[in-house]
Image (cartoon, rainbow, N blue to C red):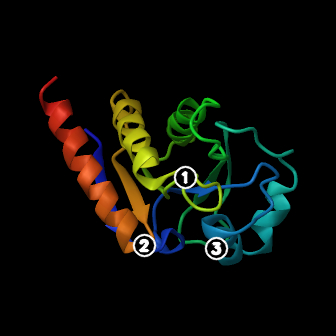
Amino acid sequence: MTVIEIIKGDITELAVDVIVNSANDDLLGGHGVDGAIHKAAGWGLFDECNTLGGCKTGEAKITGGYNLPARHVIHTVGPIWQGGEKEEAELLARCYQNCIKVAVANGCKSIAFPAISTGVFGYPLEAATRIAIPAVMDSVAETDLEKVILVCFEEQAYKVYLSVFEKVGERAKSR
């Protein structure tokens, strides 16, 4: 059974098999977690990402971790919030699902996720969390992943994740 943990911290400092990058579609770095991961990993990450041809929203691609404590980075492009009428929820869930598929396909046992799309892409935090947690819980059910860490950089996000996780966990127990 996979352990799902919620922490407040810096995803670039985690020594896990893979961290997830909430990336721009060109995969060449940007603001927020994307910029922090590229900065911490160094130019090797940029050079490898430059060979990947970008990434479509909801998809995921893996690279090396370079100067990060994580062995790999899975890059996924979350949806830009447009009011919730442009399949944003489905695309966001697909980000988490595809990252887990790529991690498992590459023999990873531990993965850490940021709050995908909740920064400059503008997805409302609580709405995104209500999608992220069930997507992760459902996706790990039939895998050999040992640990999933949901990493919140800010205190507000951490509190929202804990609250939603508690509610979703209660629903999962009553199935």
> Regarding mark 3 in the picture, which secondary structure is present there?
helix
The amino acid on which the numbered mark 2 sits, given as a three-letter code, is Glu
Question: Which residue has dot 1 on it?
Answer: 116
Question: Which residue has dot 2 on it?
Answer: 154
Q: Measure how far apart labels 3 and 2 are at the Cα level.
A: 14 Å
Q: Measure how far apart labels 2 and 1 are at the Cα level.
A: 14 Å
Given residues 86 and 49, the one toward you in this image is: 86
The amino acid on which the numbered mark 3 sits, given as a three-letter code, is Ala
Instruction: For marks 1 and 3, give the one nearer the viewer.
Output: 1
**Sequence-earlier tag: 1 or 3:** 3
- The part of the image, by quadrant, that contains residue 64 is bottom right
Given residues 139 and 8, the one toward you in this image is: 8
Where does the image place residue 148, in percent across and percent down from the top left?
38, 50
Whether residues under marks 1 and 3 lie with C-beta atoms below 8 angstroms apart, the answer is no
**Sequence-earlier tag: 2 or 1:** 1
Given residues 42 and 106, the one toward you in this image is: 42
Question: Which residue has dot 3 on it?
Answer: 36
What residue do we see at 58% from left, 52% from top? 117
- The part of the image, by quadrant, that contains residue 136 is top left
Whether residues under marks 3 and 2 lie with C-beta atoms below 8 angstroms apart, the answer is no
Structural crowding at the residue carrying mark 3, measured as other residues with C-alpha within 10 Å and reported as few (<14), some (14–19) or many (≥20):
some
Whether residues under marks 2 and 1 lie with C-beta atoms below 8 angstroms apart, the answer is no
- The part of the image, by quadrant, that contains residue 35 is bottom right
The answer to whether 151 appears left or right of 27 in the picture is: left
Q: Is residue 140 above or below residue 14?
A: above
